[in-house]
Amino acid sequence: MTTLLKHPHAEILVEDLADGRRGVKVTLQDANLFMPMDRCKTTYPLDLIQVILDVKGPCYLCDEIAREEDAEYLKKDLTNDLMAYFDEADFGNKRILDFGCGSGASTMILSRMFPSSEIVGIELDEKFLSVAHARLKHYGFTNVELKLSMDGTRLPQDIGWFDFVVLSAVYEHLLPNERRTVLPKIWAAIREHGFLFINMTPHRFFPIEHHTTGLPKKQRTSQSY
């Protein structure tokens, strides 16, 4: 069965596949817009695909799906980067904060990677967090808690202590004042002998900023934080 999802700027075809997954194909009305990928395969139900489409838009629909489901995408990066410093056993029965969890891709991946640990996702953007909640409802993970941050300089109240704090593709999105204010608060929430892990900050020589804008980077003579 093929389903057509409506969007004012694109046509999204969702086709049921023989292996039980769904194939998603996005056709933009404006072919000049940047789109990281125009098709993907997913186990998501139609209502979750629709939630992602409504929040992320058609250009980043397949990218957002693949970010969480494709083992060669974020899962591979998190595994390679975390396991370069720690053993899997180090994460057993721990509390892990996924700070700036966005739409919950990294949170769901961390939940599967470390099922005996408690994963707490914190996000500033309520719309993105709605996608994370929809993903959590889909999977039914019992070791995940999602919290909304009221602003970029505060942490939600009573979040407790953490053994690991992960900032996955987050640090570069913090404003200078937010970095000065919130990072000490994050550090203060880490238990003794705990760890703060900052992952995947873009390099200035990478030509395309595909994480958010999809635009070429401008040359800068100086920049201060």
Image (cartoon, rainbow, N blue to C red):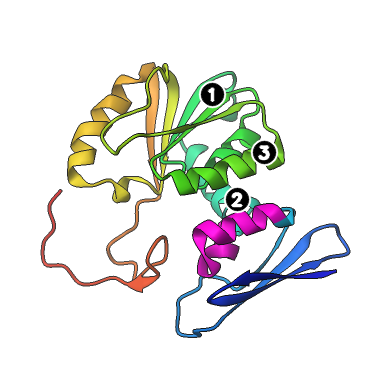
- Please tell me how crowded label 3 is: few (under 14), some (14-19), or many (20+) other residues with Cα within 10 Å: few
Image position of 77 (left or right of 1): left
Counting residues from the start of the chain, the first of labels 3 and 2 encountered is 2
Disc 1 residue type?
Asp
Q: Position of residue 88 (x, y in %)?
A: 59, 29
The answer to whether residue 54 is magenta is yes
Furthest residue to the right? Answer: 18
Q: How many marks?
A: 3
Q: Quadrant of the N terminus?
A: bottom right
Q: Eyeballing the image, is 171 above or below 205? A: above
Q: Position of residue 38 (x, y in %)?
A: 60, 73
Q: Position of residue 16 (x, y in %)?
A: 82, 65
Give SS at disc 2.
Answer: helix
Q: CA distance from mark 3 to mark 1?
A: 28 Å
Q: CA distance from mark 3 to mark 2?
A: 15 Å
Q: Give the residues drawn in magenta, as a range.
A: 47-64
Q: Eyeballing the image, is 144 above or below 213? A: above
Disc 3 residue type?
Lys
The residue beneath circle 2 is 68
